Amino acid sequence: MTQKRPLAQQHPQENVKAKSLPANAPVVMQIIPELGPGGAEQGCIDVANGLIQAGSYSIVVSHGGARVHELERGGSTHINLPVHSKNPLVMWRNIGRIKRLIQKHNVNIVHVRSRAPAWSAWKACLKTKAEYMTTCHAPYNISGEAKRFYNSAIAKGARVIAISNFVAQYLVDNYEISKRNIRLIHRGISLEKFHPANVRPAQIIKVTKEWRLPDGARIIMLPGRITRWKGHHVLIDAMAKINQPDLFCVLIGSDQGRSEYRAELEESIQAKNLGGQIRIIDHCDDMPAAYMLSTVVVSASTDPEGFGRIPIEAQAMGRPIIGTDHGGAQETIIRNETGWLIPPNDSEALAKAIQQALSLTDEQHYNLAANAMEHVAYNFTKEKMVDDTLNVYAELLQDQYLQNYKRAA
């Protein structure tokens, strides 16, 4: 018989020392593949900080990433495990790793934010006191029954957070899940960061110089990684239809290795004689300043997004937003009041909407900006998202208490 290794040797950082907390403090462990720049990662960090402020113990399990320091600065514990892996053997080993963490840290709730670690966490929670819950961040592609089965781990939670009504309906339509277990919680943003009053003129000047734009130029901006379904090609076609040499366009986002699509965009720009008007910018460190520099913001996704942060960020900054009329954008943009919704993959409709946005009078622009900022402040703040998520945790903790009380009786 082989000798079992000590717990501390089974995987790096599995034996992280728990912080000193009251005996009855709830312990919530979020699991996410990596802590990178995405919206799911931002939500994870925001909720972790909210747990600490509420007097709970917050653990985040991930494969690391550039934002671990943000998490730890807020007081949460980060534990590094290969939960990013889709390798079946690694996923199987993660079951034991996660189960040991549940037992070591007396975890009450395991909250998973991705499909691969969802399978490991669901199995790990069985026969422990920990409640298993998930967040579904997107309408995952179902290309066959095998993919449907793989996706189904995200729908097995005692509670499943859907980031939009669109995602909630996707869950009901495709998986055996009761509507009673779904909680709608839209994503939220920080109004301290995304507010016009908090952007200094120097920030806007800096971005203008970096992008080599003329002073006072009218700018159409599309933020989003360079991938076909984000619709950059639709905006390029729309710019050609508008045909205004004094109008500039900025596409912000990395191609993340998708060099063929980027090359296709660059060829299209040159073929349409738009080389002097359209810039492709790999990265922007100051998105609030970028929004303030823009005249119109576009989200041209050809496939429906589960939520989409660009529309709410643009509205929070008081910028006219044009989105496609499907998915999460239908829930974040109020048609003809805070922005425009157009058919997907329709460059003609996009060109007309851009021209309408450019033709707004000062009064119309002011009213649209006021409506948009109020809309976001009421519905899509970081604080609302965190509070709603903590309320879901409270539901599960109450269920645990009632179950323990019945067993004791």
Image: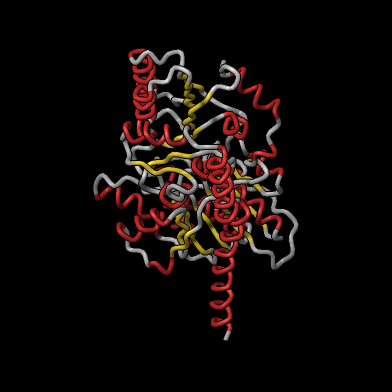
In percent of width and height, residue 315 lies at: 54, 43
Task: Using the rendered view, name the quadrant where residue 29 is placed.
Answer: bottom right
Looking at the image, residue 362 lies above or below residue 248: below
Q: Is residue 258 left or right of residue 105?
A: left
Residue closer to the observer: 94 or 237: 237
Query: Which image quadrant: the C terminus?
Result: bottom right
Task: Using the rendered view, name the quadrant where residue 324 is placed.
Answer: top left
Residue closer to the observer: 131 or 219: 219
Looking at the image, residue 126 lies above or below residue 365: below
User: Which residue: 58% across, 65% down?
Assistant: 391
Task: Using the rendered view, name the quadrant where residue 168 is placed.
Answer: bottom left
In percent of width and height, residue 258 lies at: 39, 24
User: Which residue: 70% across, 38% down?
Assistant: 198
User: Which residue: 49% across, 34% down?
Assistant: 297
Q: Is residue 206 left or right of residue 245?
A: right
Residue 82: in sight, yes or no?
Answer: no
Residue closer to the observer: 113 or 234: 234
Looking at the image, residue 168 lies above or below residue 290: below
Residue closer to the observer: 224 or 103: 224
Q: Residue furthest left?
A: 144
In percent of width and height, residue 298 lies at: 45, 35
Looking at the image, residue 225 lies above or below residue 45: above
Q: How many marks?
A: 0
Q: Which colour style is shown?
A: secondary structure
User: Which residue: 55% across, 22% down?
Assistant: 217
Q: Residue furthest bottom?
A: 409
In percent of width and height, residue 247 lies at: 47, 22
Residue 404: in sight, yes or no?
Answer: yes
Q: Is residue 93 left or right of residue 59?
A: left
